[in-house]
Amino acid sequence: MKAFKHQVDFDTNYAENTWKVLEHAIHEIYNHNASGLNFEELYRNAYSMVLHKYGEKLYAGLVNTMTGHLKEIAKSIEAAQGGLFLEELNVKWGDHNKALQMIRQILMYMDRTFVPSSCKTPVHELGLNLWRDNIIRDSKIKSKSLDTLLDLIHRERTGEEDFEKPFLEFSTRFYSGEAQQLIECCDCGNYLRKAEKHHSEEIERVSRYVDAKTEVKITSVVEGEMIANHMQRLVHLENSGLVNMLVDDKYGDLSIMYNLFC
């Protein structure tokens, strides 16, 4: 009985120590110090935690650590004044996406095994959801975003500033990164549904806040970055592309593919 208790204590200590190593790595990634990290070793540590049934601890730790960083990021964005606000928001969004890519590499085994078996949200999607909840839905940032957007539109209408150009450039960068992330973690059907959702959201957004003439341009950005640039890969995506949709009678996904591709 004593030997069994000792084994449990050892496993608990092992899991805690291993998580601390991974937690430190996540901090370093968000602090732009990833160059000194050994990603192969970190992957093995995460793999070992999942293998020894500590996937829940690993996943919960990830959520808490990312949330903590995003709360600090929110403060930085909130503090940005005037024209620097959107620039800061854009920079932090880019940083978060880069961090997500590296974190997902480390936790790839967890993403492939523990996440689906436990009905958890995949790492990339989790990161996007946490960004939405802690940044986009932050009351101060939300209010400031709307005020800044309306101010830019007003300036464009009065000839003070060209809003459309930076808006389209920002959107192109966003959807380029979004497409790269999603195509790595989604099957074809899920990818197409997310692309369709983005397409619809942009049309609604333009109708509410931006000149109607911008609708064609912003939808072209979404279609170009999320569909045209990845069309061949989507069609031939292993286990979920066009042939699989036909074989599996996925008429809903086929309909979305037809509408987006044509």
Image (spheres, rainbow, N blue to C red):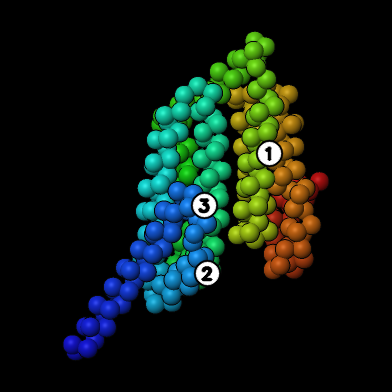
So how many labels did they put on this image?
A: 3
* Front disc: 2 or 3: 2
| 148 vs 191: above or below | above
Secondary structure type for disc 2: helix
> Which residue reaches farthest front?
36
Sequence-earlier tag: 1 or 2: 2
Alpha carbon of mark 2 to alpha carbon of mark 3: how far? 16 Å
Secondary structure type for disc 3: helix
Q: Kindly identify the residue that appears in the image at 45 percent across and 48 percent down.
A: 31
Type of the residue with mark 2: Glu
State the image quarter where residue 101 is shown.
bottom right
Could you say where residue 261 lies in the image, as x and y percent from the top left? 78, 48
Secondary structure type for disc 1: helix
Sequence-earlier tag: 2 or 3: 2
Q: Nearer the viewer, residue 29 or 137?
A: 29
Type of the residue with mark 3: Ala
Q: Is 89 left or right of 249, judged from the image as shown?
A: left
**Residue 40 seen in render:** yes
For residue 99, which numbered disc appears in the image? 3
State the image quarter where residue 161 is shown.
top right
For residue 172, which numbered disc appears in the image? 1
Give the class, few, some or many, for how many residues have Cα within 10 Å of label 2's Cα (few <14, many ≥20): few
Could you say where residue 92 lies in the image, as x and y percent from the top left? 51, 40
* Front disc: 1 or 2: 2
Q: Nearer the viewer, residue 58 or 37?
A: 37
Q: Kindly identify the residue that appears in the image at 48 percent across and 42 percent down.
A: 132
User: Which residue does the numbered mark 2 point to in the structure image?
Assistant: 40
Q: Is 79 left or right of 154, judged from the image as shown?
A: left
